[in-house]
Amino acid sequence: MHEAGLDSLPGGGAEIFHPDIRQQIADDKVDAEGWLHIHRAAHELGMHSNATMLYGHIESYEDRVDHLVKLRELQDKTDGFMCFIPLAFHPEGTAISHLPGPSAIDSLKTIAISRLMLDNIPHIKAYWVMLGMQIAQVALRFGADDLDGTINDGGSLMESYLAEGNRNFLTRAGIEELIRGAGRIPVERDTLYHPMKLDRVVASERSPRNLPVLG
């Protein structure tokens, strides 16, 4: 796939690396060693990828730190991760729906600690679809520099999406307003964090670490 043109990988499926927790919440997914091996192999081919962590369920703080340490160690070896994405657990519709999920304070602390621990990963993402718009906005002052989620620019795909009753979207103007409201400057970027202007890449280097961007 790389030879055919694939140049990046998403970071989904990491969940929590600790085997005991992973067996309970994601026993149908590749184990931690397999996930890390896939990303290590991609990085060695010159590809970049993202990394995630699902938090706020049955894991402990120690499990979160263990997860971050494993990502940091791989990044030290490969320098292939572009962005770390903490994903807030939403219990509705899961086998552990009785759990409350993470609080706003927990989410902000998780983002801040992630920024401190993963100083070798350029970007930390606030995924507003799972955090909520207001918490995601505050996260831009707690270490996140990437505000990401569905943007409604119209078109048949979005119209179909909305027809199904889904309202988890922001307009381009809305997401820019959130970023400016946090005292940051919105910059549109591509998958590899190249700043965009007039629908063209204007720089071959990654955007600055502390500059929030549109996902």
Image: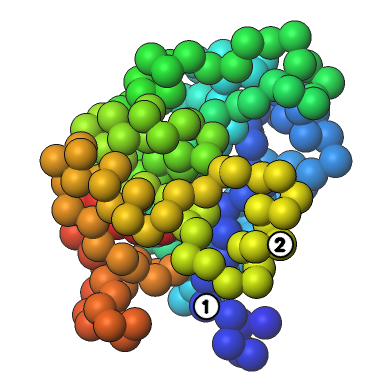
Which amino acid, mark 1?
Asp
162 to 32, vertically: above or below: below
Read off the residue under disc 1.
7
Residue at image position (34%, 82%) is: 199
Image position of 183 (left or right of 2): left
Q: Quadrant of residue 204?
A: bottom left
Question: Which of 110/199 is in front?
Answer: 199
Q: Is residue 157 left or right of residue 77?
A: right
Image quarter hosting the C terminus: bottom left
Q: Which residue is mark 2?
A: 160
Residue 116 appears in view: no
Q: How many marks?
A: 2
Residue 100 visible here: yes
- Report the quarter where the N terminus lies: bottom right
Residue 72, above or below 150: above
Residue at 64 percent across and 36 percent down: it is 15
- The vertical placement of 58 against 94, above or below, is above
- Image quadrant in which you'd find residue 194: bottom left
Alpha carbons under labels 2 and 1: distance apart: 29 Å
Q: Residue furthest bottom?
A: 4
Q: Amino acid at mark 2?
A: Ser
Spot occupied by residue 21 in the image (x, y as percentages of width and height): 71, 23
How many residues crowd around disc 1 within 10 Å: few (fewer than 14), some, or many (20 or more)? some
How far across and how far down the image is residue 66, in percent?
A: 51, 28
Residue 20 image point, x, y percent: 74, 22
